Image: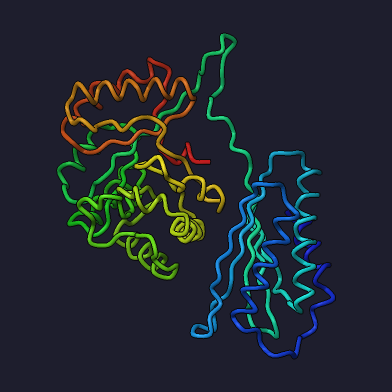
Amino acid sequence: MRLGICFFLAVLSSGCKKNEENRLTPAQVHQITRDLAAAASAAVPAGTPIKLRQGASSQQPGNTDYLRIVLKNDSSADTHRAAVARLVQSLGTVATQNHLTQDPPTETGDLLHIKLRHSGVPALEIEIVTRATPASMVGAKNSTGKVVDARLAIIIDDLGSDRAAADAVFALGYPLTVSVLPNHEHSVDIAKEAHRRGFQVMLHLPMQSVANETPEAQELHPGMPAPEVAELIGQFLQNVPDAAGVNNHQGSQATADTALMDELMPVLRDRHLFYVDSRTTAATVAYDTAQDFGVRSAFRNVPFLDHVAEVAAVRKQLELALRGARDQGEAVAIGHPHPATLQALREVLPQAQGQGVRLVLVSELVH
C-alpha cells in the first residue's frame, strides 16, 4: 500500500502549514468524519465496509473520531493500487477542504494508519485495511483429487480450575492447543506447564452470552468502552502467560455485537495475538471483524466434540472432525477436559494419520 501513503502525502501537502484558526468543536469533527465516510463510500465498490466512531468530546479533549475502511483485495495488483489511489484522493480532498494536516502515516502489512489534526490538535484517525480474499481451505490434492495434506487442530477449552484434568490432557502426548480461563485457581501454572511441554496456549476469553449462563466474574460485554476492553485483556493475559492467541468462552451475545468486536480486534492485533471464533452463535461477527482488522484468525468449522459427554458420542464427533478435515483440507475442533472426551481422544487420535489427517497446533490454521 506504499502508493497510498505517497499519494495521501501529496494531496495534503498544500495543507501542511499550521492552521491558526480556532479549534474545531466535537460537532464539527463529527461532521468532517461523516463527510470523509461519504467521500470514501463514493470512491470504493458498493458493499465495502466503512465504519466510523465519533469519539471527539469536549469532556475528553484527547479523544478523536475514527474511520475504518476495509478494501477487498480480490483483483489484479494494478487494479487494487488504482482503487487505493481513488480512495486516498477522495479522503485527501475532504481533509484539505477542512484545513486538516496529518502526522506521517504508518503502514503495517495491509494496514495504513493516518492521523489528522486541526491547528495541531488531533481530530480523527483513519485506518485503511486491505482484506485479501481468503485462500481456499482445501489442502493439496493428488492426481485422484483427494486431499493429501489434511490438517486438524483440536482446542481443549475451559482449563484453569482442575490441575488433574490439565495433567490428563498433557499425558495424551498429541499436539493439542489448550485454552485457559483467566483468574481460576490453576490458570497461571497450567498455562506455564503447557507451554513448557510444547503445547500451544490460548486465552479462553470470557464473553457475555445471550442467556448469561454461569458468567465469569469478569467478561467482555456489549457497551464496554475501548479503554476497558484493552485493560481487561491485559489483566487476563497476565493471568494466562505465554498465550499465543484467543478464543471466546461462551460469548453468544458478545461475538454478535459489532461495536464490541470492533473494540476487541485492534487490541489483539496490537498484541500480535491470533483469534479463533468458537462460533457459539450463528450470529457471530467475530471472525469477519478479525479479518477486517488484519488479525490472523480461524473459526470452529466442525461440531463441538462433547455436547454429549459420553465416550461413544465423543468418538462419533471426532470421526466427523477427521472427515471434515479430509473434506475441507483443514478443520478446527473444540472439546473440553471431560473424562469421556479424553478417553475418546485416546481411542481415536492414533487413527488420524492412517486416515490421512495430520494433527497440528491451531496457529497453523489461522489466516
Q: Residue 41 lies in what quarter of the image?
A: bottom right
Tell me which residue sits at (45%, 67%) in the image. 226
Q: Residue at x 74, y 77 (%)?
A: 101
Colour convention of the picture:
rainbow
Where is residue 48? Give x, y as percent.
65, 49
Q: Position of residue 42 (x, y in %)?
A: 74, 55
Considering every residue shown, the one lying at the far top of the view is: 144
Question: Which of 95/134 is in front?
Answer: 95
226 left or right of 68 in image = left
Q: Nearer the viewer, residue 192 or 334?
A: 334
Q: How many marks?
A: 0
Picture coordinates of residue 81, whole percent (x, y): 78, 49
Q: Is residue 310 above or below residue 9?
A: above
Specify the quadrant that holds the N terminus.
bottom right
Please state if 11 lies on the left or on the right of 200 as rendered. right
Q: In the picture, residue 67 is in which quadrant? A: bottom right
- Tell me which residue sits at (32%, 36%) in the image: 334
238 sits to left or right of 5: left
Residue 299 is situated, as x and y percent measured from the top left of the image, at 43, 39
